[in-house]
Image (cartoon, rainbow, N blue to C red):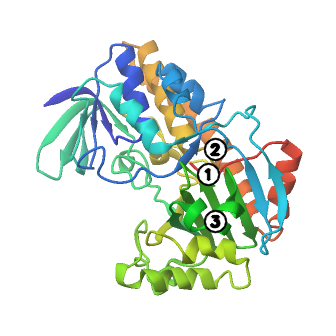
Amino acid sequence: MRTPVTIVGAGLGGLTLARVLHLHGIPATVYEAEASPAARAQGGMLDIHEHNGQPALREAGLYEEFRALVLEGREATRALAADGAVLFEEADDGTGGRPEVLRGELRRILLASLPAGTVRWDHKVSAVRALGEGRHEVTFADGTAVATDLLVGADGAWSRVRPLLSGAVPQYTGTAFVETYLFDADTRHPAAAKAVGGGAMFALAPGKGIQAHRETGGTLHTYVALRRSREWFADAGFTGPAGPGGPADPAGAAAAAGRIAAEFDGWAPELTALITDADTAPVLRPLYTLPDEHRWDRMPGVTLLGDAAHLMIPNGEGANLAMYDGAELGKALAAHPDDTEAALTAYEQAMFRRSAAEAADAADLHERMFGDDSPHGLIAMFTGAGAGAGQSA
């Protein structure tokens, strides 16, 4: 089978591209490895920004649907000391430019906006190869294959499409997040709920930190940060040193949580409870990056967007950039209906510039949060800018 535009990956970026193309009358097919939209949890809160995520949703014709998903009050930000003392606090007064939504809900409205059959579920890519003259073939794990005139890798950090363009491989940063949840926290974990407050909470120190966000109702979603080797986390009961990470061995989940909590010995119990009292087994999320100025020479008939193109340290921009990439690529293709290469060149050159700038900002934020001056560098940024910032993308 041959299709004009093939998108690998049904994340926010790939779906935004498909939606913008659809609005311009350009057919596309999205292939996704997951078996269905409900195959796994889609992550937590996203702060959608005025300069990239929101314009992308406007371009997709979904801005009003997005506004209906916003959880009020979640832009509130607080920074706590290890003993629980409040170092900085900013309420959500409704004037901020980073409204918070649940990633899964945002993906849902994107999926609903596409014609039936646009997304082909349970299509895990096993191989890609160039056919010549800008065409490519994508082979799936079930042995089927498609040929395409334009292949877009929207398939994340471990992209199967990226090697067509670049030899870059994600590198471990030396820091990992450990993800936990507390449910019905206002009733079952009131001290932790009070510590987190109504939005985002940061309790940071050099090389480590506890970050949490209030989601719907009393759900507290926590990311515990530690600068440790992949081998250290493997010894603590998580997956081995190779690969993107995953949950602790269920039989040892409590022990793994205890090992993580021990790194915060002496911290306020309402903070460590976010680890030790979690209602889910802890999940390891190692932080990997591509080079800050990752780019490639123009290769006919193929390009990348989102983490496949510019994987960086989390700074609240990842999902926003992916959607913006998708919208900008869709606009470029619509603007050059008879010259795909001109569209790809224009898209990539702009994308390279903005992603390099965002990667530099991400590295700076990471140093403010976990460097030698933590948490004072982050608080200085908050007070200097006069606005809170989320770590939820």
On residue 292, the disc is 1
Q: Locate residue 351: give its quadrant.
A: top right
Above or below residue 316? Residue 324 is above
Q: Nearer the viewer, residue 292 or 96?
A: 96
Q: Which of 57 and 194 is in front in this view?
A: 194
Query: CA–CA distance between discs 1 and 2?
Result: 5 Å
State the residue position of label 3: 190
Q: Is residue 360 left or right of residue 168?
A: right
Q: Residue at x 37, y 79 (%)?
A: 249
The label nearer to you, 3 versus 1, is 3
* Residue 313 in sight here: no
Quick one: label 1, few (<14), some, or many (20+) residues within 10 Å? some
- Which of the two labelled residues, at mark 2 and mark 3, occupies the earlier sequence position? 3
Query: CA–CA distance between discs 2 and 3?
Result: 42 Å
Above or below residue 186? Residue 387 is above
Q: Which quarter of the rendering shows the N terminus?
A: top left
**Residue 58's spot in the image, x, y percent?**
53, 21
Q: Which of 301 and 330 is in front in this view?
A: 330
Helix, strand or loop under label 3: helix
Q: Is residue 377 left or right of residue 224?
A: right
- Which of the two labelled residues, at mark 3 and mark 1, occupies the earlier sequence position? 3
**Residue 375's spot in the image, x, y percent?**
80, 65
Q: Residue at x 78, y 60 (%)?
A: 79
State the residue position of label 2: 356
**Residue 274's spot in the image, x, y percent?**
59, 70
C-beta proximity under 8 Å, tags 2 and 3? no
- Which of the two labelled residues, at mark 1 and mark 2, occupies the earlier sequence position? 1
Q: Locate residue 192: give its quadrant.
A: bottom right
Helix, strand or loop under label 1: loop
- Disc 2 marks a residue whose amino acid type is Ala
